[in-house]
Image: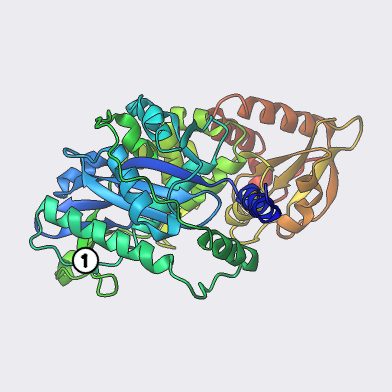
Amino acid sequence: MPNNDLVILRTAMDNQAQQPIREHHFYVSTAKFLFHHPQHGIVAVRDPIRLADAERHGLSPIVLYGLTVAGLPIRWLTFSSTKQHASLRDVLLTAWRNAEGLRGLPDILRVNRYVAQSDPTLAAAIAKIGVRLEVADAKDKTVPASLRSAQDASLWLSKRHDPIDPSLAASVEALCRDAHDDHDWRAGRGPRGLSNRKLEDNIERWLELPMRTPADILLDKADWEAGPWLSAWETSLPPDQSRYFSHDGFTGRIWLLSGEDPSEDVDDDDDITAYDGYDNVPEIAKNLVACWPNPPKEIAAAAGITLRQLQWFISERCTLDRSAHFDLERLLGIDDDERMGGYTSAGPYVLIARKAQAVEAVCLEISGGGDARPCEIVPAQGQADPSWRYVLINAFGRPPTLVMAPRGEAITERLPELIINYEGIRPVAPTFYRDVVSTCARACLTPEANVREMRNFAQRYEREWVDCAWLPD
């Protein structure tokens, strides 16, 4: 072989060896933030909504399909209705032929197991054009991350194309054009304004790769099977809340926003009678749950609600009906404070110091803003509890609260700075100390025992706490 031919062959082999492995993530899901409305066309939902709740607002779901370049914020999205969903093979071929940022065919197409199972012959079909299908295992978080990022990005697709009419078919077609235009714009050259210079360089290197356009062939036609996995994201959503439609002049879309419609006229009298004080119970309950001796699941069961309802409520993602709200207040010793127009943690409690912010907030609340002389109690004679330290919050004119702090933990060493007006260590009568330890043990048995045992404890020493002379001799 002539020397020139050898050089050309070696150069070609070196170039091939230097080419990176190209990988795309492929995902399919019911769109989390985009729906169709018969009058408004495509509607964007700021806060995710269950499909059944969306239907009550006149919204029907659409399907999102996407391809993301592994490790890069380059994606191509398209959509279809749920009743006439697109062929996965047509979606892939269209993207690989038309999406500039994908650079054509990848070496590897990574999907989750649901996509693979929905079209069992997909792997063999794309193997004909040189693409290997790989199914991500349960520990692989990259494909779910690409899907989440695509869902979030779809929310902000600007309305560049007006459909001929607001029908489902015309609206979805216009949305696809919006998504494809968005991809073309983002795949264009020029500065992207990213704060990560390394990521900028990686994007540029990817976009400099040669295109691998698929051969002009048609893959075998095959349908795919939808299932509950398409809308798995809705299982973690709280119950629906009030929502209203609003036009966004920036994106051009109609939005379904959470809350009451501010444009509605409200009669002055109705406004006054509707006001029922500020409901700060979720905030108070959140701190109390963090310090309660029993786990949240047991607290929820004792209040007659599910753990998820409790978590949603204390994170202010949903409300509780009046009966459940009252039961939770009673369980956690939360009282209505008419003077302040809200609620307060009245107690008395046995609490455990776990989270600094929660301990600080609860102790400030139950001491009335610092009107107390908290101290750690130890027996004047004999040995102290080897596992726990006990802090007494003796607020003026109110029953006491006891805070248990595990010995040797970092948060225990911080209690002097977390509990306002902390007065250090004070020896008490051994009988009183033993009563504190046994009361705490009983109060920790069940969520319902907490306030009950502390009220009994306070009654045994009623004169002392009324006179604010806590710590009997």
Q: Is residue 117 left or right of residue 168?
A: right
What residue sits 49% from the left and 41% below the top?
A: 143
Q: In this view, does 214 lie to the left or right of 73?
A: left
Is 185 or 35 nearer to us in this picture?
A: 185
Q: In the rendered image, which quarter is residue 439 located in?
A: top right
What residue sits 68% from the left and 41% below the top?
A: 402
Q: Position of residue 75 (x, y in %)?
A: 42, 55
Q: Type of residue at label 1? A: Ser
Q: In the rendered image, which quarter is residue 337 located in?
A: bottom left
Residue 45, compared with residue 22, is above or below; it is below
Q: In which quarter of the image is the C terminus?
A: top right
Residue 106, compared with residue 274, is above or below; it is above
Residue 114 shows in this picture: no
Task: Identify the residue under disc 1.
Answer: 246
Q: Position of residue 199 (x, y in %)?
A: 60, 62
Q: How many labels does the image show?
A: 1
What residue sits 24% from the left and 53% below the top?
A: 242
Q: Position of residue 248 (x, y in %)?
A: 25, 70
Q: Where is residue 397 in the image (x, y as percent from the top left)?
A: 60, 52
- Looking at the rendered structure, the secondary structure element under dot 1 is strand
Residue 164 shows in this picture: yes
Is 463 or 271 nearer to us in this picture?
A: 271
What residue sits 76% from the left and 51% below the top?
A: 415
